[in-house]
Image (cartoon, rainbow, N blue to C red):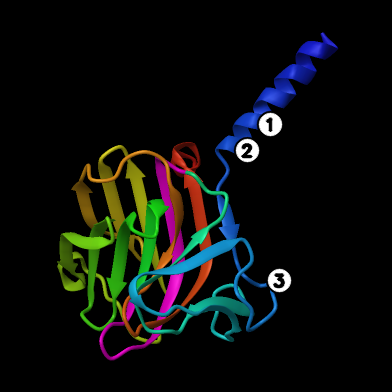
């Protein structure tokens, strides 16, 4: 009987772990350093600079992850992640940018040339979803924030979230559904992470992700 109870405890513990969401706050790292446990890069031309910075306005004080260099599409993906279906979410603050003021999430990231992106843009006040294949970014859908009662503002913290399963992806901004699409360009498991564009300087905090089981339990 004791062996049966012990086995049941192990199985339940495994189920809980499988369905648990993971949150990253960046608060225990050295300011000015690159984020530990992340791989960073850029799709296309230009540079990237992802650093841990202090920010008194951070949702989880005192630190954030900031991208401040100019490149075509700078990205940072969380090491050890591999999701086919699930969700990703982040709090972001657009700080500056003349060409763009973007914050993005990436999923099913195979490498720096193949992945999905959801972007919120303060300069254009819109939300969009893309796929990048063989290094070329293709637009799936743009939506003006006014169309779903949302707003993307410079210097303001927002929440961007993507829920994905099979060919379906839903993008939410501050809890409001912005995009609901089906697309089959990139399938299978991949890493999840963050993304910006051009000269966007953007701060990120509270990076949250999980599989389909953890999404349904939220």
Decide: is 51 above or below 114: below
Q: Residue at x 43, y 54 (%)?
A: 88
Is residue 117 found left or right of 144 in the rendered image?
A: right
Residue at numbered disc 3: 28
**x%, y% of residue 68?**
45, 84
Query: Considering only order in the chain, which callout, 3 or 2, is on the residue closer to the N terminus?
Result: 2
Please state which of the two labelled residues, at mark 3 or mark 1, is closer to the viewer.
3
Q: Which residues are magenta?
A: 83-102
Residue at numbered disc 2: 17
Residue 86 in view here: yes
Residue 156 in view here: no
Query: Considering only order in the chain, which callout, 1 or 3, is on the residue closer to the N terminus?
Result: 1
Is residue 129 found left or right of 190 in the rendered image?
A: left
**x%, y% of residue 91?**
46, 69
**x%, y% of residue 99?**
25, 87
Q: CA distance from mark 2 to mark 1?
A: 6 Å
Q: CA distance from mark 2 to mark 3?
A: 23 Å
Q: Which SS class for mark 3? A: loop
Q: Residue at x 76, y 12 (%)?
A: 4
Q: Are marks 2 and 3 in contact (CB under 8 Å)?
A: no
Quadrant in the picture for residue 106: bottom left
Q: Where's the N terminus, which quadrant?
A: top right
Q: Residue at x 22, y 69 (%)?
A: 149
Residue at numbered disc 1: 13
Residue 154 is tagged as: none
Q: Residue at x 45, y 69 (%)?
A: 41
The stretch drawn in magenta includes residue 94? yes
How busy is the neighbourhood of tag 2: few (under 14 within 10 Å), some, or many (20 plus)? Answer: few
Q: Are marks 2 and 1 in contact (CB under 8 Å)?
A: yes
Decide: is 193 above or below 197: above
Q: Are marks 3 and 1 in contact (CB under 8 Å)?
A: no
């Amino acid at each position: 009987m004791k062996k049966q109870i012990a086995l049941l405890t192990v199985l339940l513990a495994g189920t809980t772990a499988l369905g648990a969401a993971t949150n990253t706050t960046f608060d225990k790292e050295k300011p000015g350093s690159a984020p530990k446990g992340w791989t960073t890069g850029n799709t296309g031309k230009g540079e990237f600079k992802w650093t841990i910075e202090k920010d008194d306005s951070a949702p989880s004080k005192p630190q954030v992850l900031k991208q401040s260099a100019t490149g075509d599409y700078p990205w940072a993906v969380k090491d050890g992640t591999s999701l086919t279906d699930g969700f990703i979410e982040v709090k972001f603050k657009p700080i500056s940018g003349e060409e763009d003021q973007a914050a993005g999430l990436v999923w099913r990231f195979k490498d720096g040339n193949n992945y999905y992106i959801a972007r919120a843009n303060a300069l254009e006040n819109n939300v969009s979803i893309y796929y990048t294949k063989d290094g070329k970014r293709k637009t799936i859908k743009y939506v003006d924030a006014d169309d779903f009662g949302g707003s993307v503002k410079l210097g303001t913290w927002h929440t961007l979230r993507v829920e994905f399963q099979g060919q379906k992806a839903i993008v939410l901004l501050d809890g409001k559904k912005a995009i609901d699409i089906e697309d089959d360009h990139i399938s299978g498991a991949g890493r999840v992470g963050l993304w910006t564009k051009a000269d966007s300087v953007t701060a990120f905090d509270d990076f949250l992700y999980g599989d389909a089981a953890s999404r349904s339990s939220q």
